[in-house]
Image (spheres, rainbow, N blue to C red):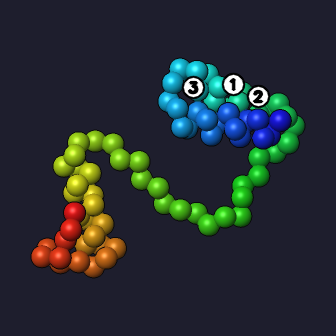
Amino acid sequence: MKLYLLAAAAHALKAPTRRSLIAATGAALVAPLTGQPAVAANDELVDVYFGCGCFWHVQHEFVEAERKILGRKDKELTS
């Protein structure tokens, strides 16, 4: 059952359609009924940014990341 729910959720992430939304919603509603508590994996956490907004906003974020994370100066920027 867990594998089916995981597969449904993974499919929903790959294909943003009405059908995949219904499948993901169904999986979310059925999961608590399985009687098993949710367990987090012991994997390392990874920061994820889902870009949304105009091109210039996202471009600015890349430039700031180059400056902050990579320590680049204005003449060294590649974004």
Q: Quadrant of the N terminus?
A: top right
Q: CA distance from mark 3 to mark 1?
A: 8 Å
Q: Which mark is residue 21?
A: 3
One can see residue 12 in this view: yes
Apparent side of residue 32 relative to residue 57 in the rendered image (left or right): right
**Residue 68 location in percent, x, y?**
30, 73
Look at label 1 and name its amino acid.
Answer: Gly
**Residue 79 location in percent, x, y?**
22, 63
Tell me the crowding category of disc 2: few under 14, some 14 to 19, or many 20 or more residues within 10 angstroms, Cα based.
few
Marks 1/2 in contact by CB < 8 Å: the verdict is: yes
Marks 2/3 in contact by CB < 8 Å: the verdict is: no
Tell me the crowding category of disc 3: few under 14, some 14 to 19, or many 20 or more residues within 10 angstroms, Cα based.
some
Residue drawn at the location 76% of the way across and 28% of the way down: 30
Instruction: Place residue 63 in its image quadrant.
Output: bottom left
Apparent side of residue 61 relative to residue 31 in the rendered image (left or right): left
* Identity of the residue furthest to the left in this view: 75
Apparent side of residue 71 relative to residue 34 in the rendered image (left or right): left
Q: Which residue is mark 2?
A: 30
**Residue 78 location in percent, x, y?**
21, 68
Q: CA distance from mark 2 to mark 3?
A: 14 Å
Look at label 2 and name its amino acid.
Answer: Val
Residue drawn at the location 53% of the way across and 20% of the way down: 18
Decide: is 78 above or below 11.
below
Which numbered disc, 2 or 3, marks the residue closer to the eye? 3
SS type, badge 2: helix
Residue drawn at the location 34% of the way across and 73% of the way down: 69
Apparent side of residue 58 relative to residue 24 in the rendered image (left or right): left
